[in-house]
Image: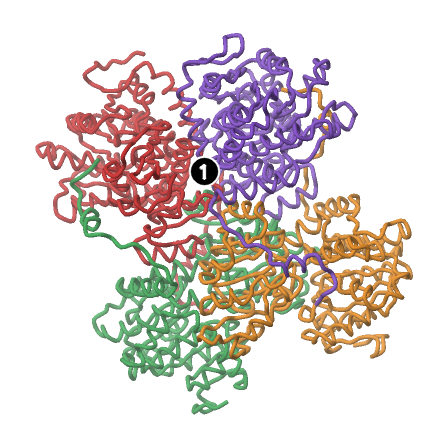
Chain colours: A purple, B orange, C green, D red
Amino acid sequence: MATTLNDSQYDIRDITLALEGQKRIHWAALDMPVLRQIRDRFVKERPLEGVRISACLHVTTETANLMLTLKDGGADVVLCASNPLSTQDDVAAALVTEDIPVHAVKGEDNDRYYRHIVAAIQHKPHITMDDGADVVSTLHQEYGDLLPGVVGGTEETTTGVIRLRNMAGSGRLAYPVIAVNDARTKHFFDNRYGTGQSTLDGITRATNLLWAGSRVVVCGYGWCGRGVASRAQGMGSHVIVTEVDPITAIEAVMDGFEVMPLIEAAPIADVFITVTGNRDVVDRQHFAAMKNGAIMANSGHFDVEINVHALREMATHVTEVRPMVQECLMPDGRKLYLLAEGRLVNLAAAEGHPASVMDMSFANQALCATHLIKHQGTLTRQVHAVPTVIDEEIGRLKLQAMGVNIDTLTEAQIAYLASWESGT
Amino acid sequence: MATTLNDSQYDIRDITLALEGQKRIHWAALDMPVLRQIRDRFVKERPLEGVRISACLHVTTETANLMLTLKDGGADVVLCASNPLSTQDDVAAALVTEDIPVHAVKGEDNDRYYRHIVAAIQHKPHITMDDGADVVSTLHQEYGDLLPGVVGGTEETTTGVIRLRNMAGSGRLAYPVIAVNDARTKHFFDNRYGTGQSTLDGITRATNLLWAGSRVVVCGYGWCGRGVASRAQGMGSHVIVTEVDPITAIEAVMDGFEVMPLIEAAPIADVFITVTGNRDVVDRQHFAAMKNGAIMANSGHFDVEINVHALREMATHVTEVRPMVQECLMPDGRKLYLLAEGRLVNLAAAEGHPASVMDMSFANQALCATHLIKHQGTLTRQVHAVPTVIDEEIGRLKLQAMGVNIDTLTEAQIAYLASWESGT
Amino acid sequence: MATTLNDSQYDIRDITLALEGQKRIHWAALDMPVLRQIRDRFVKERPLEGVRISACLHVTTETANLMLTLKDGGADVVLCASNPLSTQDDVAAALVTEDIPVHAVKGEDNDRYYRHIVAAIQHKPHITMDDGADVVSTLHQEYGDLLPGVVGGTEETTTGVIRLRNMAGSGRLAYPVIAVNDARTKHFFDNRYGTGQSTLDGITRATNLLWAGSRVVVCGYGWCGRGVASRAQGMGSHVIVTEVDPITAIEAVMDGFEVMPLIEAAPIADVFITVTGNRDVVDRQHFAAMKNGAIMANSGHFDVEINVHALREMATHVTEVRPMVQECLMPDGRKLYLLAEGRLVNLAAAEGHPASVMDMSFANQALCATHLIKHQGTLTRQVHAVPTVIDEEIGRLKLQAMGVNIDTLTEAQIAYLASWESGT
Amino acid sequence: MATTLNDSQYDIRDITLALEGQKRIHWAALDMPVLRQIRDRFVKERPLEGVRISACLHVTTETANLMLTLKDGGADVVLCASNPLSTQDDVAAALVTEDIPVHAVKGEDNDRYYRHIVAAIQHKPHITMDDGADVVSTLHQEYGDLLPGVVGGTEETTTGVIRLRNMAGSGRLAYPVIAVNDARTKHFFDNRYGTGQSTLDGITRATNLLWAGSRVVVCGYGWCGRGVASRAQGMGSHVIVTEVDPITAIEAVMDGFEVMPLIEAAPIADVFITVTGNRDVVDRQHFAAMKNGAIMANSGHFDVEINVHALREMATHVTEVRPMVQECLMPDGRKLYLLAEGRLVNLAAAEGHPASVMDMSFANQALCATHLIKHQGTLTRQVHAVPTVIDEEIGRLKLQAMGVNIDTLTEAQIAYLASWESGT
């Protein structure tokens, strides 16, 4: 497996996995036609020539296709993992053979994880490309001297966008960041259909449980939660939703789900899935109330949603009984099962979102990177929306690639929508 | 049936229907607990004392409960129909016996419809309460002298809000209007679950068709369209969506629906339902392509979505074969069926939205009226959002009335959501 | 409204309703293409020439089309109601103007109901055509002298088939009866999609309740119960199933529904629907436990499923608050609502099953009548299945009429299905 | 890894995999409470003492639990694979360390597969336990001398039951076989929820495709097909069903699916799944018509449903592009993807059915084995139904284990169901 990079430029599991990774990257590319078109244009136009990009993303086959696109656009890219358990080691290897430095090893500990973040930061990025805002946060807290060199950043997730808004709100954000997450072509699809499917997939692979007839608690009814609840219902589960927002809770009820406080759901549910973006959502009192055999999984960005620390403290014994399944023996003899150590189960126990949805998400990433470069110096140090023109262009290309035709407004209809005079 | 009003103060079908109307108004009240609480408070606080309100709404049992609430708040209310076919004559009669002037007769022609609008306007309103913006539009176009007396208005529907935004955009809006439609507690529920259910209900009552196995085209995948598509699927129909927005179209595809141009759906579908807010969505070319027996219904605000005029021109013969069902014999022998003359089928052929969703919508109306009075003179001549505090208060009250409890954020969780420093 | 019958030959509400009935019968005919083809053939072949048929069926537009078909086949038909509340008076009138004697008045009391049954029996039928087995039962118990003249019978419902099997089992059945209910083209469709849709329709018309978010208990998970549960879920309800059969209960759980004893569901549900075919399913202890505002409806054949007698005894006051809605004031102040007096709500409060499903059910009736005549004297005094050839022929014709094409087996495939030798 | 067996007694991949297999078998046992109770009883009662059983089943964790149960019941068990691709090598190893001879290697060729069948036959079984009838078929065709020693057999699948009925029908079946497949506690659950979930799981693992918005063709709408169609719809796919039976086809239409001949679906679908039990369902003309990128998978018992032989002939090149995914390059440049070589994708690419459904299926197997022994010599050489008492007992135990309570009939209700006299 050849690479022009030397050993010190990357940190991965095993470069001999590259061939398997290449095959899978190619397979994913088949379902990423929008990114493909952007890549084809990038090859010709080189809009990112010489731009240093530090990407901190889940190292998956879809991310690999984004990296290759950025590289073909002229960028000088470094990639580090955005989660200790989400890396696909064969993909990491394959990217290294494409001469893209990767710092990511599945199952790395926290120290190594942060060494990888730092490696990406030391690339002195013009653009940061984050999934969860760990690079932007570390950069601001520890590498302030590099901030002036940064043109801008992009952020992939709801969680990251919340962190960034908090930074901007307190005047701490030092450069403009585009909230890729908030694009219609991103969160409507990636967060809903992507998370919905891949979360169930991760839990199925980890446990091979029967969804039909299971009682599944979904904590959080945001875009991700809706996706998960909808898919679990589609698999025949009886879904219970927990929420903290009253209006959202009414939506969940009217969508046909049961809604109750988690402490009431704890003793009756078989599976608990967190997608809240908040910490300690499943906590001591819930562990204490769960029934024997309960399964817990998180699909939110950080591993704080299930209080794993408390669970381990409460348990008298913790054993891995299947890959990604830890059995926690409670003092009263109950056995609770924690999947993927409370990290995002869809990436840790399965392959993450299907390429077809990541196609739109990463098309936004690629085009927002060029937007940042093009508008360098003109954007405020705030969290910015994805430009509508980019969002809509991606929608059009995707629909076309799907082979779906739709209606177009006539002149008379456009005029009607702009009018107010004529009524009943 | 007693009323203190004299004959010239109202125009309704038949006052002897009042008893039936009263019963049904009372029945609806059982499912409107939030409005009930507001009404109880209004009785004590009289926040609308002496305020003249001209309401142009569908004359249903739910609207009647809103009228009684406003009256109990001290308001001097007049009600006219917001659609020629949506009036429930027994409700109109019942309100008159409550001394509320009503101008509304089911099946009234356009002249009478506008005489009723004018009657409402001549009430010299401080507040206009619109459903489709016919009062605000007529007032601006023909009764400009009354504009200075208007404190503000509220608008119930998507269609009306679009008209008002166009007015405001062209600098023509003479007073502030609150877009009740856009409240979370309104459009998430009323437009989706309300329209979804009541549209199918109207079509079922008009036709008694079997939904299972029918091919149903839903034109428009906005909030109303989603509701209709979801309910039709829930009844076993094969649903085809038509759209003009690419991103919305992809959503429809990923929600499992077929998406295609209407002209392609025309020859294969059994039922066509319009919920677009636009005109001539179903037009000559579609009528020409439809199969024998096709059924058309509109659930959008105005009767312009199906080009009824063109349909009648093309037909060699039009007969009413069941109440609310017109058979249009086409020159080639095909028979097409138009429901409710292309007017909103859920109100013309059924009772409109269930009280339980209107509870939230009309709670918004009542509280926005008091907001307009309280903030008289301070609001710009724009379309305003429903104040968040009103929206959320309604959500809380509704959830409580539904007997549903939810979780609340801990201090630590609130702090976490406001932070950005801690990461993986 | 002309008829050759004299007054003593029929008993209906009002013959002047005939025109409205005719229109609606014609409308239903549009969705009954299979029966149409049979009728066309009957006109030519007259297979029932001179056969006296006593039909006891719900007097609906679909039944009317069956009566006209039998008449066109040469039969001498009399029709009486199979339920006191299911008669459509305009349809009864229309049939009389077609010279078919009808004995049926919506809302008739039990005495009149049985006078009507007796009128049908006194027609001295060659064939009885039952829906619930009231004619066959009365005939056996009170008119034994007429039994020798009966060639055979048909039975439309699950309930009736159970009664007949009990009769046959105890050696009491005096002539062969075909269980139309058990045909694949009948119970798969009529009982599931028909009852599912029409039951919700009846409840919606009676109450205009919001299904989304309601807790709906479906008592019984047979074919009818599955239909009701599926449709309620499709409308956004949270569905709870009660059952007495363990295996069926597991199915309900794995279909995603909650399953529990009715007494546990009583205090938490908003709506109770019975489709069990058994008596006193909802009884005193349940009424005592229900929450204020609970709604009860039955869609099973007889009005015994909800113990209406006990409910009225327990209530301190019963009032009709809307058509088909009785408010029962309980001693503790709770108000419980009984729809359609506990009779089948889909026929009492709505129009019954859509014509499209009744098309297949009644095609079975028509063809089974000819089968009985053709095989007169050769069938045992048992409950017989619908001949497969009839069942499949109806399936083929229906599919064709729906415009749906399917695959056909190749010779090689037919051979393969008949073999056993070749394996992996 | 210790075993008392010698090398010649088994043929597996690698005995060092045993530990992993043991863990997974233990994990599956947690979701098999009914089998657990049977096993506990078997330990005490030893109902199969000395009975030689030749089992030909998919070598999965659930099967392992059945084998251990039989062994604990006193049986002398040998297990061979019922499909060349369904073996879990770690499970095979684990069983060998439990001293159960296993003949099964994932990916074995046809010769080795049949050597394994023969090894099982040479065990001289008193009971054959088949999944697809390969043992019973080979035994009858090639080892007729052993037939007199066989007490009886059981059969797990629809396909096997069809083969056996054909054998019995032609007078060739030499001993009684119980059709475990036809038990209510088997085919209602295993074939529907099991196959539904595991088929999608297999395809997801093989491809990571996005189900939402995909067009999925399900060939065959039997119990398995219903499960697959329902789950695909639940994941957001647009499902097209193909059928050969008209009545079943109408059901599919009324369940909301599109139904059409496969040749019409071929050019528009993304995924094709066969569950028909027939051969060459997807054949040359379909391959020729499919669009580029089409994916094909089989979930029927044998690999004959997709004409793999023809596909390979038509392709100019076949490459494995991901594990279990073969890319077939067609002469016109289209690429078609065949999963798991056309063998049952749920077992080849995923873990097969969840333990929770297999619990009931294999409880039937265990109890039917004891039934065969108990009634030795009294059963005819036919295909027999699972005794109702066994079926219902399993249902009761399962429901109990699920923690679900249900209602029970009162005396009055039992009497009512047995009566016929009282009517309306």
Taking the image as drawn, is residue C212 in sight? yes
- Residue of label 1: D400
Query: Which type of secondary structure does the marked residue at label 1 adopt?
Result: helix
| Residue closer to the observer: C271 or A253 | A253
| Above or below B240: residue A368 | above
Q: Estimate the x, y position of residue C132 in percent, counting from the top left.
A: 42, 68
Q: Estimate the x, y position of residue A321 in percent, counting from the top left.
A: 45, 20
Which quadrant would residue D329 be assigned to in this image? top left
Q: Quadrant of the N terminus of chain B?
A: bottom right
The three-letter code of the residue at mark 1 reads Gln
| Residue closer to the observer: D14 or B53 | B53
| Above or below B97: residue B50 | above
| Above or below A357: residue B287 | below
Which quadrant would residue D274 be assigned to in this image? top left
From the viewer's perspective, tell me whether residue B373 is left or right of residue C30.
Answer: right
Residue at x 52%, y 12% (from the top left corner): A11
Q: Quadrant of the C terminus of chain B?
A: top right
